[in-house]
Amino acid sequence: MITFKNVNLRFNDLVVLENFNEEFEENKINCILGPSGCGKTTLLNLLCNIVNENSGQITKPEKVSYVFQEEALVPQKTARKNLELVLKSIYEDKVELKAVIDKFLKISNLEKAADLYPHEMSGGMRQRLALIRAFAYPSDVLLMDEPFKALDITLKDSIIKSFLNLYEENKRTVLFVTHDADEALLTGDFIYVYGNKPMYLQRKFEVSGERENRKIYDNNISQIKNEIYKETEKWHISTNNR
């Protein structure tokens, strides 16, 4: 379980979190929506110690993997070598290391790209590689910071399917920051809608039903989407009242 208890964080005069309390569901995909600059990425950074809280208590597992907005691949290394770089300290036996890498390359349909360098791969291939690098690392928590932001609609749909396939094979607690309500509705078990600032929870939604059968136009999904949009309208009201 990931919990924030009375957490405070400020950068000079900017108060990001003030007595912030939250629990994120274990072994579920927790999607985080909020206006730009409200502190969504900061939550992820607190969980992987990029930044530290000023006060309060954060309970979190030790092993964390992170999928950034950019792929953050090493350009001088092939797809296989990019995976080896992350995993060689975990799997010291070379046969086991190769088996793990082969497994994830197969799941993501990247077997034929194993010996390609990032500049030789398409944007979708690089994004899948970034995903399997995070999943292959045996973490307890996977943090995702808008990893599908720069993809076109068709490619995004394909990469999201790859992500969900990886998740079903290797379940763990996921915190997925996104600006896209459809992404959250199609992937998430829970959706947290936050307001700005200091960051506060406006509303939490639970999305039921098998992910592979979800459609945005289904009645239950479209109802939640309408409720989410009601919450996001409050962001503009808050901004205009400053």
Image (tube, rainbow, N blue to C red):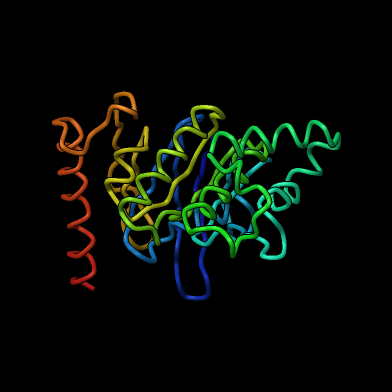
Image coordinates of residue 146 in percent, x first then y, are 43, 55
Q: Quadrant of residue 64?
A: top right
Image coordinates of residue 127 in percent, x first then y, are 51, 53
Residue 114 vertical position relative to residue 240 in the rendered view, above or below: above
Q: Residue at x 13, y 31 (%)?
A: 219
In the picture provided, is 96 more to the left or to the right than 1? right
Image coordinates of residue 199 in percent, x first then y, are 38, 57
List the single residue furthest toward the front.
Answer: 112
Total residue callouts? 0
In the picture provided, is 111 more to the left or to the right than 180? right
Nearest to the observer: residue 1 or residue 125 = 125
Q: Residue at x 75, y 47 (%)?
A: 84
Q: Quadrant of the N terminus?
A: top right
Residue 84 vertical position relative to residue 217 in the rendered view, above or below: below
Residue 166 vertical position relative to residue 152 in the rendered view, above or below: above
Q: Quadrant of the C terminus?
A: bottom left
Q: Quadrant of residue 185?
A: top left
Nearest to the observer: residue 194 or residue 113 = 113
Q: Quadrant of residue 237?
A: bottom left
List the single residue furthest toward the right.
Answer: 93
Q: Residue at x 30, y 53 (%)?
A: 153
Image coordinates of residue 81 in percent, x first then y, are 73, 51
